[in-house]
Image (cartoon, helix red, strand yellow):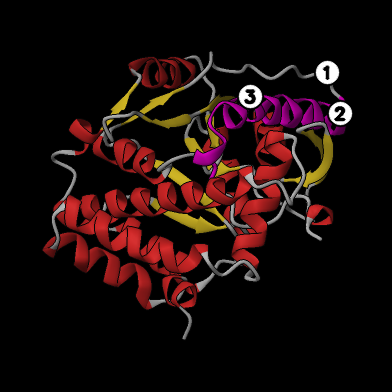
């Protein structure tokens, strides 16, 4: 079994949680560097091609540009370090999470204010830095939230969901049933969270880095239909290795009565916000599927 196949196996996350208990952070980072070195030389792998093609579009340079050689390695390293902190936190519990990841209190205040005014809240975000830590922060605060995860999840994602459930996070793969639950939750002034930067053949063509790409719009449809507000959460990693979660002002969707157009307008607004964040820190974007496969030679 190839190294990256093991990481994506059912056993991979469980091994990660075990190593999080027995290794120091420094030791775990060294192990992560070893894994990244192995992955970075596999230039014919789907993983390598996906990361390189996405970086090429974000940076506006050709796929063959030498600048991308080191960029791919940095993306994989940042992702590996993020997984280290995610697994270590799950292994040790949430007591120290706020010393590792700082949450902008205005996010919580905005969500609770919307709830008190009779609105649910859809939290959205991109695969920036260690977005999983944001989930754990919400769990630490006792936030009752439903997470809509990728429907065609690999075994590792299913294992992740099991681990998340230990901290009270209701992770549900996207399906008609889970979307019905999410709509019911939002209609009752509850909270739902989902990532929205993954290519989705069931989505709609949105403009992303000056190109059209099929991106999810279910989050926007849920918000429009339920009357929920939306928060775009951004996780950034600082030079000292800590993380911070920020967000622009809460979005109150414009509802004209045209469900299709209102949904597309809101989804595009969210995509544009995320584009700006990714453009500022392209090596922190942990997207391992090609959004623009035509860029790959």
Q: Is residue 160 magenta?
A: no
Residue drawn at the location 42% of the way across and 63% of the way down: 37
Q: Position of residue 129 (x, y in %)?
A: 44, 40
User: Which residue in the protein does label 3 denote?
Assistant: 276
Q: Label 2's element?
A: helix
Image position of 2 (left or right of 287): left
Q: Earlier in the sequence, mark 2 or mark 1?
A: 1
Question: Gap between marks 2 and 1, in whole Å?
Answer: 9 Å
| The quadrant where residue 239 appears | top left
Tell me if residue 282 is in the magenta stretch. yes
- The quadrant of the rendering that contains the C terminus is bottom right
Q: Residues within 10 Å of mark 3 (few under 14, many from 20)?
A: few
> Which contiguous range is marked in magenta?
258-286
Asked whether the beta carbons under mark 1 and mark 3 sit within 8 Å of each other, the answer is no
Residue nearer the viewer, 171 or 293:
293
| Spatial CA span between label 2 and label 3 | 23 Å
Instruction: Find residue 256 and name its label.
Output: 1
Q: Is residue 175 positioned above or below 185 on the image?
A: below
Decide if residue 102 is on the left or right side of residue 269: left
Instruction: Please state which of the two labelled residues, at mark 2 or mark 3, is closer to the viewer.
Output: 3
Residue 261 shows which numbered tag? 2
Q: Residue at x 63, y 16 (%)?
A: 252
Tags 2 and 1 touching, CB below 8 Å: yes
Q: Residue at x 34, y 64 (%)?
A: 34
Regarding residue 151, the answer to whether it shows in the image is no
Left or right: residue 86 versus residue 111 is left
Q: Position of residue 59 (x, y in %)?
A: 68, 35
The answer to which of marks 2 and 3 sits earlier in the sequence is 2
| Residue 136 vertical position relative to residue 202 in the rendered view, above or below | above
């Amino acid at each position: 079994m190839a190294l990256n196949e093991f990481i994506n196996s059912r056993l991979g996350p469980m091994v990660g949680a075990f190593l999080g208990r027995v290794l120091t952070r420094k030791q775990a980072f060294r192990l992560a560097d070893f894994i990244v070195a192995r992955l970075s030389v596999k230039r014919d792998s789907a993983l390598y091609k996906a990361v390189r093609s996405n970086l090429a579009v974000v940076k506006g340079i050709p796929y063959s540009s030498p600048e991308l050689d080191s960029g791919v390695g940095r993306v994989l390293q940042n992702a590996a370090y993020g997984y280290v902190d995610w697994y270590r936190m799950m292994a040790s519990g949430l007591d120290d999470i706020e010393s590792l990841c700082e949450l902008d209190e205005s996010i919580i205040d905005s969500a609770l204010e919307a709830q008190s005014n009779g609105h649910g809240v859809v939290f959205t975000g991109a695969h920036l830095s260690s977005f999983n830590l944001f989930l754990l922060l919400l769990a630490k605060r006792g936030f009752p939230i439903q997470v809509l995860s990728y429907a065609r999840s690999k075994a590792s994602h299913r294992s992740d969901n099991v681990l998340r459930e230990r901290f009270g996070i209701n992770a549900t793969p996207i399906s008609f049933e889970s979307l019905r639950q999410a709509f019911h939750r939002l209609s009752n002034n509850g909270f739902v969270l989902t990532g929205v930067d993954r290519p989705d053949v069931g989505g709609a063509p949105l403009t992303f880095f000056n190109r059209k790409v099929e991106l999810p719009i279910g989050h926007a449809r849920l918000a429009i239909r339920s009357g929920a507000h939306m928060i775009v959460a951004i996780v950034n990693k600082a030079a000292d290795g800590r993380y911070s979660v920020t967000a622009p002002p809460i979005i109150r969707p414009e509802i004209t009565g045209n469900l299709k157009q209102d949904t597309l307008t809101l989804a595009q607004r969210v995509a544009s916000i995320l584009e700006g964040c990714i453009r500022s820190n392209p090596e922190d974007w942990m997207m391992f599927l090609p959004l623009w496969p035509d860029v790959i030679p």
